[in-house]
Image (cartoon, grey):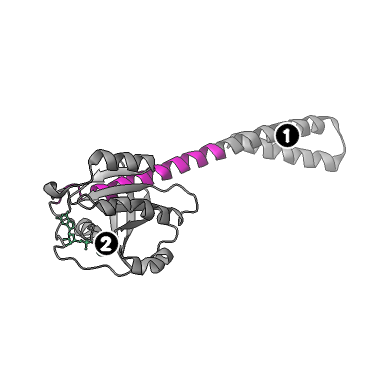
């Protein structure tokens, strides 16, 4: 069982529904924030997400960030070294979609070129008649920019858990890939070293059989013992 922890930044324009989404997710759908309360700076919420078909889990430290420009300087300090990102826009507000490029760029400056899992979230799909950003357009933009895409309605409690499940699973997947590459590196080093040890010890054993100088013989015999122990491992 592996327990991972990830810092997940939630960003996007003001009033797109970031806080409503984060609160809803962390309260297990118990409460929809109907009234708009502007977030000043960052609000931190924590929730553990189980990884399907494993006994592993990811503890998400969710940084619900302010959309207002006024707080942007403060945000950049709190955003340092994120492990995952969630960029939210409002499907009834084209400007909020266009600004996702700006949010993504700002977040990428925090990751020092390292790939981190991310998801683009189109919220407020319940406002069908006011919709201006189409699924295909947003999905394509997300794909081009290396992000997953999902659409939700926090108000109608539709797919509101998806964004965090997506980032938690991707983060877990990245962890597994890193562990696998570490294991193959260790195996590779082990194989190389055991080959080297075998060659060195073979020479030592050969010499020990022929040279009758006591000190050297003792030294070579201990090399032989070490080699045999290595072989047993
Ligand atoms: N119709 C509808 N309204 C929503 C939905 N999600 C959030 N809202 C409303 O949108 C408004 C803004 O929501 P917030 O979550 O406060 O927005 P925010 O993105 O956190 O805004 P800032 O903190 O200023 O960045 C609130 O009145 C919410 O009730 C949704 O799925 N559908
Ligand atoms: Mg907010």
Asked whether residue 53 appears in the rendered view, the answer is: no
Element assignment for label 1: helix
Asked whether residue 102 appears in the rendered view, the answer is: yes
Q: How many marks?
A: 2
Residue located at (25% from left, 44% from top): 150
Q: Nearer the viewer, residue 189 or 146?
A: 146
The crowd level at tag 1 (other Cα within 10 Å; few <14, some 14-19, many 20+) is many
Mark closer to the observer (1, 2): 2
Q: Position of residue 14 (x, y in %)?
A: 26, 62
Residue located at (44% from left, 61% from top): 80
Residue located at (28% from left, 57% from top): 47
- Magenta-tinted stretch: 157-186
Q: Nearer the viewer, residue 161 or 206?
A: 161
The crowd level at tag 2 (other Cα within 10 Å; few <14, some 14-19, many 20+) is many
Find out whether the residues at labels 1 and 2 contact each other: C-beta distance under 8 Å: no
Q: Which residue is mark 1?
A: 201
84 lies left or right of 137: right
Residue located at (22% from left, 42% from top): 134
- Most extreme residue toward the right, as rendered? 213
* Whole-number angstrom distance, CA of label 1 to CA of label 2: 69 Å
Q: Which residue is mark 2?
A: 14
Judge whether residue 179 is colored magenta: yes
Disc 2 within 8 angstroms of ligand 1 (CB): yes
Q: Position of residue 154 (x, y in %)?
A: 17, 53
Judge whether residue 142 is colored magenta: no
């Amino acid at each position: 069982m592996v327990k991972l922890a990830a810092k997940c930044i939630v960003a996007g324009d003001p009033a797109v529904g970031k806080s409503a989404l984060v609160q809803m997710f962390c309260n297990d759908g118990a409460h929809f924030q109907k009234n708009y309360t502007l977030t000043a700076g960052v609000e931190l919420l924590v929730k553990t997400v189980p990884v399907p078909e494993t006994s592993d889990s990811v503890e998400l430290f969710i940084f619900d960030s302010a959309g207002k420009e006024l707080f942007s300087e403060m945000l950049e300090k709190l955003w340092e070294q994120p492990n995952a990102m969630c960029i939210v826009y409002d499907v009834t507000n084209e400007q909020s979609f266009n600004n996702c490029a700006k949010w993504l760029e700002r977040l990428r400056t925090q990751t020092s070129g390292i790939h981190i899992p991310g998801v683009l979230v189109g919220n407020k799909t319940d406002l069908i008649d006011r919709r201006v950003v189409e699924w295909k357009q947003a999905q394509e933009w997300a794909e081009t920019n290396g992000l997953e895409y999902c659409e939700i309605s926090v108000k109608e409690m539709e797919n509101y858990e998806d964004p965090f499940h997506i980032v938690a699973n991707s983060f877990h997947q990245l962890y597994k890939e890193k562990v696998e590459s570490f294991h193959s590196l260790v195996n590779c080093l082990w194989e190389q070293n055991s080959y080297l040890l075998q060659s060195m010890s073979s020479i030592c054993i050969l010499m020990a059989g022929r040279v009758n100088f006591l000190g050297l013989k003792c030294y070579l015999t201990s090399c032989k013992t070490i080699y045999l122990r290595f072989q047993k491992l």
